[in-house]
Image (cartoon, rainbow, N blue to C red):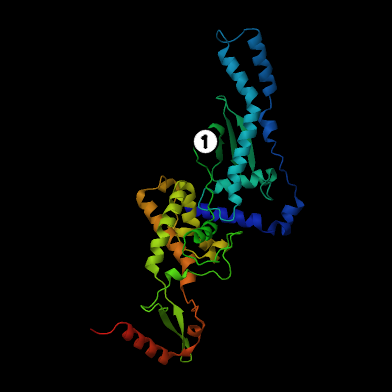
Amino acid sequence: MEDKNIRINLQVKQLNESNILGYDQRYISGSSNYNFALLDNAYKGTGKVYAKLKTTIQNNDCMEPGCKQETKALKALMDAPQMSLDFLANITSQLSVTDDNYYDVNQDYRYMLANAIMNGKPGFDINSGYEVALTLLPDGSQQIFFNGPMFEQPLIINSASLEALLESGTNIVAETPDINKDMLRLLGEIGVMGAGSINPETGQLTPKAKISEEFVLKNPDGSFDYEIIDIGGGKGRNILKYDLDKIERKVTPFINAEVSGLLSQEQEAVAAWNVFIGRMSTTQEDDQMAQNANAGSLSWNYNEVLPLSQRNKEIFMLKYRNYFFHNYLKQFTTNQIPTVTADAAVFDLNEGKKKQAQDILKDNPRK
């Protein structure tokens, strides 16, 4: 099922975002009809039902004393228009998530099709074979029905069930949290970046962003402990070395708190796994939102993994941590040039290594 969801979701997304129908003569020459008349069709004939119920109650010609059944039906009919408006607003809000840049295409493809129908996207009209209908049910609830050529089976949503889910904090379409935005914010909160690394007004990194000197390794005499790298042509240069264990100890509590917040909304956590975390994609891939930026075969099926087991929560925590270190901290701990001007100069590689060995022996004399 997951493969079908991915395939059709991406197909619909590509169709909605492309200009292909502008060059389709069959579509251009044909007429489009998006007048699904949801409310008109749903309330057709209700005027007569209302009048009959009203008369029955006034004449006390009810099925039982007190007219409880008729009064209940009349009230449901009177409340129905506002219920319809609320129901359609909830449906529209839920389906609109499929338009998000980071929408998890592992979700039921019918939600994206329904959104295309509700928003009158080209190619999803009545003449193309698509239909949507709102129905008032005898129990007082309402039902919306979507169907068409790309549906393997219709999508049916009940108003009472949807309202109960929303009130409990559950959505029918999971929204993917913007992990990259959240991690950029987290980078400024973890206390490892140096002064002036974060713009206090925008919260964005500044061009001079760097790890605090507190986390840079130093020699016993207080000088910086450098690693020498080969830059070719017999030349070398120094780069800073970082206390990665110290950084990890500093960062871990913040990551734990962040992940705990994410896991409080398990649907969103699954979406984050499928779009960002599971595959360990790069931020560049995530921004492009190409198909291979999703978790692919590593994707979690919502029906199978919810509620999340303790094991999956631990896996998510580990992958989130690795993603943060790989995409956000690694760039500040890799190939960083010394802040001491003299130490940043290029030098003869062999001479530099020889001096480094001498300094090590000097700092660690044999007993």
Q: Is residue 257 visible?
A: yes
Q: Position of residue 291 (x, y in %)?
A: 54, 61
Q: Residue placed at 37% from the left, 54% from the top?
A: 314
Task: Please rate how many residues cluster around mark 1, counting C-alpha atoms within 10 Å: few if below 14, some from 14 to 19, many from 20.
Answer: few
Farthest-out residue, right? 29
Q: Tag 1's secondary structure?
A: helix
Q: Is residue 150 visible?
A: no
Number of numbered tags placed on the structure image: 1
Closest to the observer, 196 or 271: 196
Q: Note whether 265 is above or below 163 in the view shown.
A: below
For the C terminus, give its image quadrant. bottom left
Closest to the observer, 188 or 324: 188
* Quarter location, residue 366: bottom left
* Quarter location, residue 214: bottom left
Q: Position of residue 75 (x, y in %)?
A: 61, 20
67 vs 334, left or right, is: right
Q: Residue placed at 65% from the left, 54% from the top?
A: 16
Q: Note whether 225 is above or below 252 in the view shown.
A: below
Q: Residue placed at 66% from the left, 14% from the top?
A: 54
Farthest-out residue, left? 367
Q: Position of residue 56 (x, y in %)?
A: 64, 11
Q: Position of residue 296 (x, y in %)?
A: 47, 59
89 vs 193, left or right, is: right
Query: Which residue position holds label 1?
Result: 167
Closest to the observer, 30 or 136: 136
Residue flagged by tag 1: what amino acid is it?
Glu
Q: Residue placed at 70% from the left, 45% from the top?
A: 127
